Image (cartoon, grey):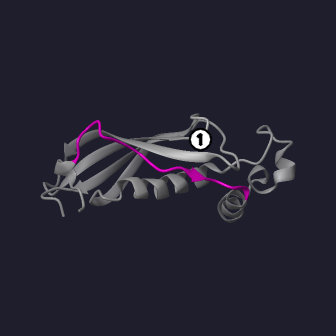
Amino acid sequence: MMRRFDDLVVGERRTSAGLVIDEQAIIAFAQDFDPQWFHVDPLAARGSAFGGLIASGAHLLALWRRMDHDLNGDIDYYCGVGMENVRFRKAVRPGDRLTLESEIAECRPSASDAGRGLVRMAYRMTNGASDVVLDLEAINLVYRGAAA
């Protein structure tokens, strides 16, 4: 059953299953979308400021989107309208086990359409050592009315 705006409660938290990112995934993504040398060349990356291969920030955002769909895919979204306060806090390395936590931070009815509500979600992605690697807020429109 899809949850609608009126079913959502500020303060609700959810935590995803873990996802392990490997070297091949980091390199493959970066080759297509962010081919900086410290994302695609493990040997050269050893000499970088990061001391080794790291995932692209764009890759982390793609993983966030996938993990969020698994976590909150039961919400009847109309569409996303923005992201705020996106912060890459710590480099993600091959073998890191990523976990995503979401929290409903705000719910308010749309001022322009009674059939939708605005929902602000706060997210925090951590690695296996519980270090925060990414945090952000996503603003979405969600259908109102009875659960679908």
- Residue 92 x, y percent position in the rendering: 65, 44
Depth check: give the residue in front, 55 or 7. 7
| Residue at left offset 48%, top offset 58% | 66
Label 1 crowd (10 A; few <14 / some 14-19 / many >=20) = many
SS assignment for the magenta stretch, majority? loop
The residue positioned 41% from the left and 58% from the top of the image is: 69
Residue drawn at the location 84% of the way across and 44% of the way down: 46
Task: Please give left or right for residue 4 compared with residue 72 in the image.
Answer: left
**Range of magenta residues:** 8-23
Task: Give coordinates of residue 67: x percent, y percent.
Answer: 47, 54
Quarter of the image where the C terminus is located: bottom left
Can residue 87 be seen here?
Answer: no
- Give the total of numbered labels: 1
Residue 139 in the figure: left or right of residue 23: left
Q: Nearer the viewer, residue 9 or 140?
A: 9
Q: Is residue 88 left or right of residue 147?
A: right
How far across and how far down the image is residue 104, in percent? 31, 41
Front-most of residues 13 and 34: 13
Q: Which residue is mark 1?
A: 127
* Residue 83, percent from left and from top: 42, 46
Judge whether residue 30 can be spotted in this image: yes
In the displayed structure image, the side of residue 6 where residue 11 appears, left or right: right
Q: Amino acid at mark 1?
A: Asn
SS under mark 1: loop
Q: Quadrant of the N terminus?
A: bottom left
Magenta highlight on residue 119:
no
Residue sitting at x 15%, y 58%:
115
